[in-house]
Amino acid sequence: MPPAAAHVLPPSAPTRAFGRYTLRALIGKSESTMTWLALDAHTAQELMLTMPRVPPAKPQALAQWLVEARRAARLDHPSIATVIACDAFEQWPYVAVDRRVGTTLDEWLSQHPRPQNDEMAQWLGGVLRGLAFAHDAGIAHGDVQPHQILLDERGEARVMAFAVGTGATEAASPVARDATTALDPRSLRRHRLATERDVLAAGLILHGLLAGQPAAGSHDTAKAIEQMAPQGREVVRLPWTTPQPVPEALRAIVNRSTSAQLRLRYRSARTFLGALDGWREAVAGDESGPVALLIDRLRTVGHLPALPGLAARVSRVTNIESQRTDEIAQSLLPDMALSFELLRTLNSAQVQGTQIAGNGPVLTLRRVVALVGVNGVRLAANSLRQWPGPLDDAGARGLRSAMERVRLAGHAAQALRPAGYDAEVVYLVAVLQNLGRLLLRYHFADEATQIDDLVRPEPAPLQPTTAGPAAAEHAGLSQEAASFAVLGVDYESFGGIVARHWGLGDDVLHMIRRLAPTQPVRKPDSDADLLRIVASAANEAVDALELGSAPKVAAALALVVKRYARTLRIDGKALNIALKEARELLRSSGRAPAAKVTSLTPALVTTVGAASFPT
C-alpha cells in the first residue's frame, strides 16, 4: 500500500447531521479545509462537502466567503469539478460536489497499485489545467491538497473546492465589489502570490507521488510550504532512491517546481503545465509536442533566417566563372542558415547517398557546392527567410549573439583539431552541436529567454547578512536541466531530431551530440568519435567564456583542460592559443566588427592570453 494511503481517514462514527446532509466519513483534511463524504437526505445523493476547518467569525466574513466561493463555483472547465451547492449551515459554509465525479487522490492511491510516472504526470497535468483556467479568471484555489484532487474512472483529474480554505477570501481574487479594488496593486499582488502558492502546492503533490512519501514529511501541502524558503530551511528535492526510476527530464521539472530558490520556481500553472506536457509528449512521440511543433514551424518559416546581405554575397561569388568551389564555400560558411539549408538539400532524395567512397558522410560545404552546383546554391539561398524572420528586435539580438557564440566555438574547434583533420568538417560539427540551441532561439524565443534566466546564477546580496555562507551566490540550473524544466525536452534531442528529419546519417548524428558534462572522455574509437570530442571541447570552452568574471572563466577553462587533456593532448597554453585564434578568425571571416565580438564574450579579452589557468 502506498505511503499516501495512510492519510485516508476511516469513516467517522457515529454519523452526524449537517442540515439536510448526513456526514458519513471524513475523507481528507488540512489545516485549512476538510472534506466529508455526505448523503443528501432530500435526494439520497452521495456528495463530497468541503468546508473550512474554522468557520468565519462574523456574519460579514461569512457573506464575503459565500460571494467568493459562489464566484469560484461558476468556473466551467473539464479539469474543475462542478459545484452543485454552495451554502452555509449554522454559520458554517460549504461547497458540495457530486461523489460520482471521482474519488480523491488519497482514496485512489489506497485502492490501486502504484501508478507509473507518466500516469502521475498526467494527473498533475489535469490539475494544472484547472488551476491555469481559474487563475486566468482571477481566482486562486487557496489550499491545493490531495483531498481536493478527484480522479475518475478514466484517470482524468479534476480540482474541487476553489476559495474554500480559511483566509482564501482575501487572497483568492483581486476582483471585489468595484473596479477600483480590482486594480489595486496590493490586491493584485495578493492574487499573484496566491496563484504561485497554488502552483508550488501542485509541485509538492507531484514530488510526493514520485518520491513515494510526502514532501517535507507532511501530507498537508500548506505545512510543507511553511517549512520551505523563505519561511523555513527545508530543501525539497527528489531523492535518488525512489520507488521507480524517475527520468532526468521529469526530475528536473519536479525539482524546479519545489526549488529552494524562489526565482527558479514556476510562476504560473501554464508554464509548469507546458514543461510537463512537453515531457509527456516527447516520451509518447505525440504529434502535438514541442518537437512536432518545431518540425511544423520548419516548414512554415524555415530553420533559421539568412543574415542580411546574403543574396548579394551569393550572387557575387557564384557569378564569377573562375571561382572555385572551395572559395565559394568559404564565403558562404559564416551564414549558418545557408550552411544548414545546403546540408539539408544534400540529403534530399535527389542527391542522397552521393558520397566520396570510403570517406564517410559528406560534411563540407565545398563538396556540397560541387554536388548541387551554383544553381543549387542560389536556389537554397532564395528559399531562406530574410533576417530576422518573425523575431522582434530583442529576439533578433539574442539569435545574432547566439550565432556569433556558435561561430566562435566552430573556429575554436578548428584550432584544437589534431593534424590531418579537415578544418571545415570540424567547424561544421561544432556548429551542428548547437543546432538545437539555435533552433530554439529562433522558433521559441520566449522559452529560450526563460532558459537563460534559469541558467544564470543568482548574485549574492550586496549587503552582508546573518546567513553567513548561505548568502553566497546561488548557482543556476544546468543547460540541460533548464531545457527540461521549460520544454520537457533537452537541447540535444531538439537538434538531433531535426537533424534526423533532414536526413543526416547516423555518423553525423553521433558527432553532433555533444558529450554530456558528466560523461567521461575516453580514447576515441573512430574519426567520428574524435570529431565529436574536439567539437565538445570547443563548445565547453566557449560556454566557459560566458560566465562573466575572470576568476569564474579561468576556473571553468581549467576544468575543460583537465577533462580533455589526455584525449586531445592539450594543456592550458594550447587552449589559450586556440581561443585567441578563434577570436581572430571570427573577426576576420564573419563581417562582425571586433567590438561586437568583445561585447558577446566579455571575459575573452581579459582571460584569453592571460594564462590565468593551469598549463
Image (cartoon, rainbow, N blue to C red):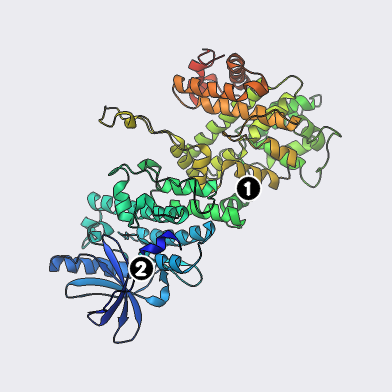
**For the point 53% across and 16% down, which residue is it?**
608
Q: Amino acid at mark 1?
A: Leu
Of the numbered discs 2 and 1, the one sitting upstream in the chain is 2
**Image disc number at residue 298:** 1
Mark-to-mark CA distance, 2 and 1:
38 Å
Q: Amino acid at mark 2?
A: Leu
Quadrant in the picture for residue 464: top left
Residue at the limit of the structure toward the top, as seen here: 610
Residue 334 shows in the view? no
Residue 613 shows in the view? yes
Judge the density around disc 1: few (<14), some (14-19), many (≥20) Cα neighbours within 10 Å: some
Q: Is residue 179 left or right of residue 251?
A: left
Secondary structure category for the residue under label 2: loop
Residue 69 locus on image (x, y percent): 27, 67
Residue 36 locus on image (x, y percent): 31, 72
Task: Judge whether 45 appears above or below 563 on screen.
Answer: below
Disc 2 marks which residue? 75
Q: Is residue 275 left or right of residue 344?
A: left
**For the point 74% across and 42% down, which residue is it?**
506
Give the number of the mark in front: 2 or 1.
Answer: 2
Residue situated in front as seen by the camera: 243 or 600: 243
Residue situated in front as seen by the camera: 387 or 261: 261
Residue 579 locus on image (x, y percent): 59, 19
Residue at the limit of the structure toward the right, as seen here: 357
Residue situated in front as seen by the camera: 527 or 319: 527
Secondary structure category for the residue under label 1: helix
